[in-house]
Image: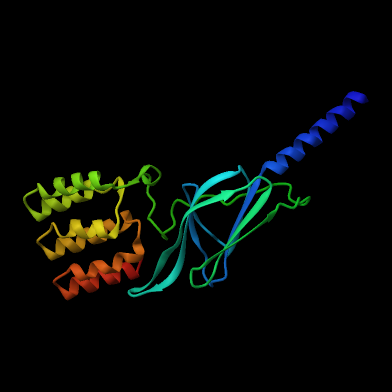
Amino acid sequence: MYKQLLFAVCFLFTAMISFAQRSNFTISTTGSTNLKIIFAGKKYSLQDRSCTFQNLAPGNYSLTVYQWQPTQSGADYVSVYNGSITLIAGKHLELTVMRFGKAVWDEGYIARDEWNDNEMNPQPDNNYGGGPHHDRNDENRMAADAEQFGKIKRAINNEFSDADKLRMAKVTVKNVWLKTSQVKEIMNLFFDDSKKLEFAKYAYDYCSDKGNYFTLAEEFFSTANKNSLLDFISGR
C-alpha cells in the first residue's frame, strides 16, 4: 500500500512538472479570411480564424504569417509578420492579426483543461497556395545570398540564346528562394520580352516576397505581356 501511494505521489509530481514546462501558442485573426502561416519551418493553411498549438517545448520558434489583402494588382496573401516568437514554460502566447495586418500580442499562464484528453495540434499542409509555393524541396531551400545569386546570374548569362538562358534559369533557381528584386535582375538578362514573361511566371513559386511581385510588370516593353503577368499574379 505504501509503495502504491508513493508511486501515485511521484507520478502526480512528475505530471505537474511536465505540465508546468509546456507552452501553448494561439494565432487568430479579426479579419474575414483565414491565415496561412509557416511555423517552426512547417506550413499551415488554417481552417479557422483561430488555432492553438499545444504542449510545445519552450524556446524560440520561427513564424511567418500571411493574410489575404487587397494589392495594386488585385488581392493576394501578403506577409504581415516575419520573425520569431519566444515560448515560455507554463505560459500561453497569443497572437492576433487585425483585419489590416497589425499584430497584437498577449500572454498568460496555462490553465489545466480536464476535458482535453487528446491534445490535437494542427497538421502541416504541404499543398496550400498562400505564401511561398510548396514543393518537395521547400524544407531544404535557402535564400540565395549575394555569392550564390552571382553564380546563378553568370550561369544564365553565359548561355548564347534566350531559349538557352531560360532553360538554365529554370534549373538554377529551383533550389533557392529569390527576392522580387533578384527575379527582376534575371529577367533583364533576356532580350526577348516573351522570355522575360515566361521566366517571371515560372519564378513566382520561388519568390519569398510575393507582395512585391506586381512591380515586375514595369520591366516589359509590351503592354500585353505586362497585363499577362498581372493577370497571372491575380489568379494565384
- In the rendered view, does 173 fall on the left or right side of 76? left
Viewer-side residue, 136 vs 220: 220
In the rendering, at what x and y percent does residue 172 appear?
Answer: 22, 46
* Image location (x, y in percent) of residue 80: 45, 64
Residue placed at 88% from the left, 27% from the top? 4
Q: Position of residue 55 (x, y in %)?
A: 65, 45
**What residue is shown at x 35% (from left), y 69% (from top)?**
235
| Most foreground residue, 35 or 63 | 63
**In the image, is 200 to the left or to the right of 210?**
left
- Residue lying furthest left: 160
Q: Is residue 56 left or right of residue 82?
A: right
Q: Name the quarter where the C terminus is drawn.
A: bottom left
Q: Give how far across and how far down residue 200 sits, in percent.
A: 23, 61
Which residue is at a point 29% across and 71% down the rendered structure image? 231
User: Camera-side residue: 110 or 164?
Assistant: 110
- Note whether 227 is above or below 188 in the view shown: below
Quarter the N terminus occupies: top right
